[in-house]
Amino acid sequence: MITLMSRRPADGGMTAVSLSGLPSRLSPASGSGVREENGGKAGKGCGRAKSGEAGREAAGDGNCEFLIFPGDVPEIEGAVTPCAVGEQTVCRIRESDGRCRAVLAAERLLEYGANSRYGLAVKLRKRGFSAGEAFFAADRMVEKGAVNELRDAEREIARIASKGCGRMRIEADLSAKGYSRETVAAMSDRISEIDFAGICRSVIRKKWGAMPADPALRKKAVASLMRLGFSGSDIRGACSKKD
C-alpha cells in the first residue's frame, strides 16, 4: 500500500507531499544524484525521481517527498492525514514534482542574470530536467515577467555594442543565446539606431591608430573588423571621416 501525507510549505505556492511504501533502489549511477524505480507496480511508467531536484528519498525506508502545484492533483489537496493513493495519482504527483523543481531551479538561474526562454530551458535540460519540465518552467518565468525577451535583448544589444562589435555579431549572439527570430526581428529598429560606423572608427583607432595604408595590412584589418560583425559600409564610413 502507498500512503500519502501532504502539507502546505512556507512559500505558500506549492504543496509538500510525502509518500511512503514506494519500492525503490539506488541506481548504479547514484553518484550523479539520480534515483530510479526498481520496476515495482507503484512506480511503473512514472519516470525518474532526481535526488535534490525532483524529490528527496529517505535512505532505505521507501519514503519520498515531493512538491506539487495547487490543482495538479485535486483529490489530495488539503490532505493532512495519511490516505491510500493509486498508481495514477503517484504518476501525477511525480510529474507535478518535476515541474515544481524545474520552476525553482529556473528562479535560481535567473538570479545570476537574464536569459531567453529557450536559453533558460537549455540550462535546465543540462541540469537533468526533461524537455517538458524545462519548457514548462521557462514558460512560467515568461508568464511571471521574470523572462522578458524584448527587454533582455535590448540590454544584450547595448552590452555587445559596447564591446566594439557590429550588427552581424549582435544578431548572431542574440540567436546563439536562444532569442527567438521574432525577438531579433523586433529589435531590428533598435539595432539600426546604433552608429556602427562610429564604433568601427573607435576600434580602428584603438587597434591601429588609423587604417593601415599598406594593401596587405589593410586587407587583414578589414577581415578583422568583419569578424567583429561590421559590414563593408560600416568600415567605409569609419574610414571616410577624419578625426
Image: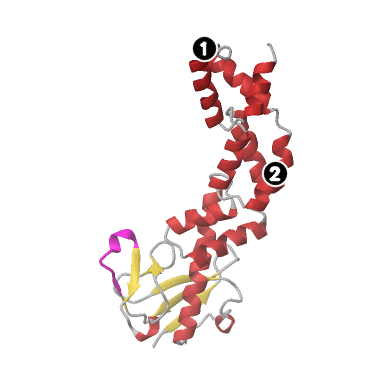
Whole-number angstrom distance, CA of label 1 to CA of label 2: 38 Å
The amino acid sitting under disc 2 is Met
Q: Which mark is residue 67?
A: none
Q: Is residue 221 visible?
A: yes
Q: Magenta segment range?
A: 25-33
Residue at 60% over, 66% down: 13
Is residue 201 depicted above or below 92 in this figure? above
Residue highlighted by disc 2: 187
Residue 121, given in percent of the width and then of the height, sits at: 52, 57
Q: Nearer the viewer, residue 174 or 142?
A: 174
Disc 1 designates what residue?
214
Residue 133 higher or lower than 238, as above or below: below
Residue at image position (49%, 70%) is 97
The residue lying toward the viewer, choosing from 126 and 229, is 229
**Where does the N terminus fall, quadrant-wise?**
bottom left
Q: Residue furthest left?
A: 28
Q: Give amino acid for label 1.
A: Asp
Q: Is residue 148 visible?
A: no
Decide if residue 116 is on the left or right side of residue 182. Answer: left
Give how far across and how far down residue 166 sits, in percent.
Answer: 61, 32
Asked if the magenta segment contains residue 106, the reply would be no
Of badges 1 and 2, the one in the foreground is 1
Contact between marks 1 and 2 (CB within 8 A): the answer is: no
Q: Quadrant of residue 36?
A: bottom left
Mark 1 falls on what kind of element?
Answer: loop
The secondary structure type at the circle numbered 2 is loop
User: Badge 2 local density, few (<14 within 10 Å), some, or many (20+)?
Assistant: some
